[in-house]
Image: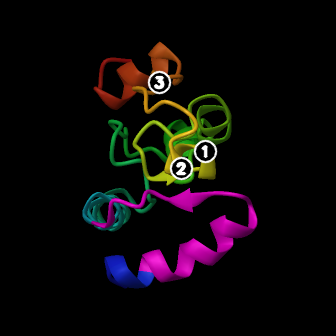
Protein backbone atom coordinates (compact mmCIF):
# COMPACT_ATOMS: atom_id res chain seq x y z
CA UNK A 1 0.00 0.00 0.00
CA UNK A 2 1.21 3.51 -0.73
CA UNK A 3 0.28 6.88 0.80
CA UNK A 4 -2.36 7.67 -1.83
CA UNK A 5 -4.06 4.30 -1.32
CA UNK A 6 -4.06 4.83 2.45
CA UNK A 7 -5.54 8.31 1.96
CA UNK A 8 -8.27 6.92 -0.31
CA UNK A 9 -9.05 4.09 2.10
CA UNK A 10 -9.18 6.19 5.28
CA UNK A 11 -10.85 9.33 3.92
CA UNK A 12 -14.41 8.00 3.55
CA UNK A 13 -14.24 6.13 6.86
CA UNK A 14 -13.16 9.22 8.77
CA UNK A 15 -15.62 11.49 6.92
CA UNK A 16 -18.48 9.37 8.28
CA UNK A 17 -17.17 10.21 11.76
CA UNK A 18 -17.07 13.96 10.99
CA UNK A 19 -13.32 14.26 10.38
CA UNK A 20 -11.55 15.54 7.31
CA UNK A 21 -7.94 15.40 6.28
CA UNK A 22 -5.97 18.61 6.39
CA UNK A 23 -6.46 20.38 3.04
CA UNK A 24 -2.70 20.94 2.77
CA UNK A 25 -2.21 17.99 0.41
CA UNK A 26 1.57 17.96 0.70
CA UNK A 27 1.50 17.79 4.49
CA UNK A 28 -1.30 15.23 4.50
CA UNK A 29 0.47 12.93 2.07
CA UNK A 30 3.74 13.26 4.01
CA UNK A 31 1.88 12.19 7.17
CA UNK A 32 0.29 9.27 5.29
CA UNK A 33 3.74 8.17 4.17
CA UNK A 34 5.09 8.44 7.71
CA UNK A 35 2.18 6.34 9.01
CA UNK A 36 3.17 3.63 6.56
CA UNK A 37 6.83 3.92 7.62
CA UNK A 38 5.76 3.43 11.24
CA UNK A 39 3.62 0.45 10.27
CA UNK A 40 6.68 -1.11 8.64
CA UNK A 41 8.94 -0.15 11.55
CA UNK A 42 6.68 -1.05 14.48
CA UNK A 43 3.91 -3.19 13.02
CA UNK A 44 1.33 -0.48 13.77
CA UNK A 45 0.60 2.99 12.44
CA UNK A 46 1.83 5.08 15.35
CA UNK A 47 1.31 8.83 15.09
CA UNK A 48 4.28 10.19 13.15
CA UNK A 49 4.40 13.27 15.39
CA UNK A 50 5.09 11.30 18.54
CA UNK A 51 7.86 8.94 19.58
CA UNK A 52 6.57 5.38 19.61
CA UNK A 53 8.11 2.75 21.87
CA UNK A 54 7.45 -0.05 19.40
CA UNK A 55 5.45 -1.89 22.06
CA UNK A 56 1.86 -2.18 20.81
CA UNK A 57 0.29 -1.97 24.26
CA UNK A 58 2.36 1.04 25.26
CA UNK A 59 1.69 2.72 21.90
CA UNK A 60 -2.01 1.88 21.72
CA UNK A 61 -3.03 5.46 22.59
CA UNK A 62 -1.04 6.90 19.67
CA UNK A 63 -2.06 4.47 16.95
CA UNK A 64 -3.72 6.57 14.29
CA UNK A 65 -6.33 7.80 14.77
CA UNK A 66 -4.98 8.35 18.25
CA UNK A 67 -6.95 8.45 21.48
CA UNK A 68 -6.41 12.21 21.65
CA UNK A 69 -7.86 13.09 18.25
CA UNK A 70 -11.44 13.53 19.45
CA UNK A 71 -10.70 15.99 22.29
CA UNK A 72 -8.07 17.79 20.18
CA UNK A 73 -10.43 18.34 17.25
CA UNK A 74 -13.32 19.27 19.56
CA UNK A 75 -11.23 21.95 21.25
CA UNK A 76 -8.82 23.10 18.53
CA UNK A 77 -10.40 21.95 15.25
CA UNK A 78 -7.27 19.89 14.54
CA UNK A 79 -5.49 16.91 16.01
CA UNK A 80 -1.97 17.16 17.45
CA UNK A 81 -0.20 16.35 14.18
CA UNK A 82 -2.67 18.28 12.02
CA UNK A 83 -3.76 15.32 9.92
CA UNK A 84 -7.38 15.38 11.04
CA UNK A 85 -9.34 18.63 11.07
CA UNK A 86 -12.95 19.68 11.17
CA UNK A 87 -14.91 22.11 9.04
CA UNK A 88 -14.45 24.96 11.55
CA UNK A 89 -10.68 24.67 11.11
CA UNK A 90 -10.96 24.51 7.32
CA UNK A 91 -13.23 27.54 6.97
CA UNK A 92 -11.27 29.57 9.53
CA UNK A 93 -14.08 29.98 12.04
CA UNK A 94 -11.75 28.59 14.70
CA UNK A 95 -8.21 29.96 15.08
CA UNK A 96 -5.34 27.73 14.01
CA UNK A 97 -3.50 27.18 17.28
CA UNK A 98 -0.75 24.77 18.24
CA UNK A 99 -2.41 21.74 19.81
CA UNK A 100 -0.75 20.88 23.12
CA UNK A 101 0.39 17.36 23.92
CA UNK A 102 -2.24 15.43 25.89
CA UNK A 103 -0.28 12.21 26.15
CA UNK A 104 0.72 11.38 29.74
CA UNK A 105 4.39 12.13 30.51
CA UNK A 106 5.18 8.50 31.38
CA UNK A 107 4.15 7.42 27.88
CA UNK A 108 6.18 10.22 26.31
CA UNK A 109 9.19 9.03 28.31
CA UNK A 110 8.57 5.45 27.21
CA UNK A 111 8.74 6.61 23.60
CA UNK A 112 12.15 8.05 24.44
CA UNK A 113 13.19 4.76 26.06
CA UNK A 114 13.31 6.46 29.47
CA UNK A 115 10.48 4.70 31.26
Q: Which numbered disc, 2 or 3, marks the residue that appears first in the sequence? A: 2
In the rendering, at what x and y percent does residue 114 appear? 31, 18
3D distance between C-alphas at marks 2 and 3: 34 Å
Contact? badges 2 and 3 (CB < 8 Å): no
Contact? badges 2 and 1 (CB < 8 Å): yes
58 and 51: which is toward the camera: 51
Q: Residues within 10 Å of mark 1 (few under 14, many from 20)?
A: some
Left or right? Give the position of 51 relative to 16: left
In the rendered image, residue 86 lying in the magenta stretch gets the answer no
Task: Residue 91: tell me if it is visible.
Answer: yes
Report the residue marked by disc 2: 91
Question: Residue, x 49% and y 30% (percent of image)?
Answer: 95
88 and 56: which is toward the camera: 88
Q: Residue 20: name its quadrant.
A: bottom right
Report the residue marked by disc 1: 88
Q: Which mark is residue 9?
A: none
Report the residue marked by disc 3: 107
Position of the C terminus, as image quadrant, is top left
Amino acid sequence: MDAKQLFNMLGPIQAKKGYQFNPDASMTMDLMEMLLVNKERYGHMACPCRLASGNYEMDRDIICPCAYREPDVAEYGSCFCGLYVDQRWIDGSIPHKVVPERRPPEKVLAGLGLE
